[in-house]
Amino acid sequence: MFGNLKPQAPDKILALMGEFRADPRQGKIDLGVGVYKDPTGLTPVMRAVKEAERRIWEAETTKSYTALTGEPAYLDALSAMVLGRTRDSDRTAMLSTVGGTGAIRQAFEMARMGNPDLTVHVSDPTWPNHVSMLKFMGLPFVEYRYFDSATRGVDFEGMKEDLARAKKGDLVLLHGCCHNPTGANLTLEQWAEVVAILERTGAVPLVDLAYQGFGDGLDEDAAGTRLVVSSLPDALVAASCSKNFGIYRERAGLLMVQVADPAQRELAQGALAFLGRQTYSFPPDHGARIVQTILEDAALAADWRAELEQVRLGMLSLRQQLAAELRSLTGSDRFDFIELHRGMFSRLGATPEQVQKIKDDNAIYLVGDSRLNIAGLNRDSVPVLARAIVEAGV
Ligand code: LMR
């Protein structure tokens, strides 16, 4: 049986993690996988998470199953955090998922159940695993223009032109904030134009919100998503708690499916329960319980928000430092886009050869498309990276 297996191409981001670990050079710098690191290189357990775990440990009396679609109190607390006042509970079905990736995968499954003929529209570029999952599922997809390699901003005219070609019932995958891998994001005015196109075409949005709180703030980062759900009849939102709660390995995520009519909600909720049961039955609970415990307690939530804000501001200040360093080394403002980008990532616009040279000469690891994880830097490594970028001729 297994002799028939074909070798699978390794995920480029995960392969880079392995390559970095195996590099014996002192002072190596990992700007690959999207994991937050503090200035000492640690991915800390957040204070509120530690405290929530302590409370859970003390209070928990059973490890029996919770609900098939996830603990209702978790779904309630997290959906409120994501959608704020735009949440329409009568029209929203929810599923606790195995991280943000699980939410995306189940969103694709739901969309296919709703429309077996759908085409999925993804940004060019997008998170490589979006494309990988679509290929694996045999779901047809097309790319819409997104990144302008000259300005390193959004090619909004191209994006609008391409999205206007979407058909009724197609799925349009949008990054809610902190676009991965480019770091270039839509303004709220641009979100409004995208919503108008979706309204005209009848295509359905799937918002991937994996970095809420890492860009401009918790509410600011959800503003596009909230505009989408409050303006359109059907919408899917996939949220992740991996990054903003720093609970990567706990796999806590949420899929929300907003339907046009409250009468359809039960159907959608049933479909989500069915999908969960077919894949892994009950979702994991520990990460979800941490999030619920934090969000339900005003003091814990305030402490979590404060720590998250510190993380966000730290990344912003590294962006400013890197842009300033490159300005002084090159005597030009052509790297100022780094300061304008938001979230963990920026796409530098370097060639694969330049990315390779930066790695060979300096033991600095960027993803092959020249995506760099800002959170992998600190005040001391920023000048090292800036010099490496210039020496590689970027
Ligand atoms: C990334 O893009 O680096 C993260 O989302 C981690 C992953 O799973 O790829």
Image (cartoon, grey):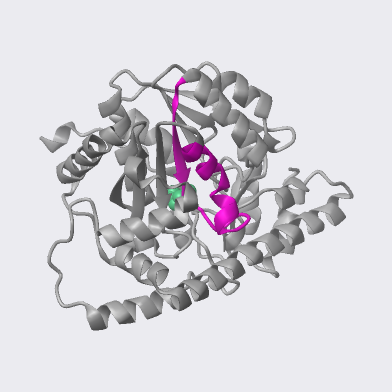
Residue shown at 81%/58% (left/top)? 324
Give yes or no for residue 200 being in the magenta stretch.
no
Q: Quadrant of residue 181?
A: top right
The x, y position of residue 49, in whole percent, is 40, 73
The x, y position of residue 186, in whole percent, is 63, 39
> Looking at the rendering, in which quadrant would you find the N terminus?
top left
Q: Quadrant of residue 73?
A: bottom left
In the image, taking residue 341 as reference, residue 165 lies left or right, namely left
Residue shown at 44%/65% (left/top)? 246
Give yes or no for residue 217 being in the magenta stretch.
yes
Q: Nearer the viewer, residue 289 or 100?
A: 289
Q: Is residue 165 above or below residue 70?
A: above
In the image, taking residue 126 as reference, residue 260 lies left or right, namely left
Residue shown at 45%/43% (left/top)? 208
The x, y position of residue 229, in whole percent, is 47, 39
Residue span colored magenta: 202-230
Please identify the residue farthest to the right as the structure is shown: 331
- Is residue 344 shown to the viewer in this render? no
The x, y position of residue 257, in whole percent, is 34, 40
In the image, taking residue 225 as reference, residue 154 lies left or right, namely right
In the image, taking residue 266 as reference, residue 78 lies left or right, namely right
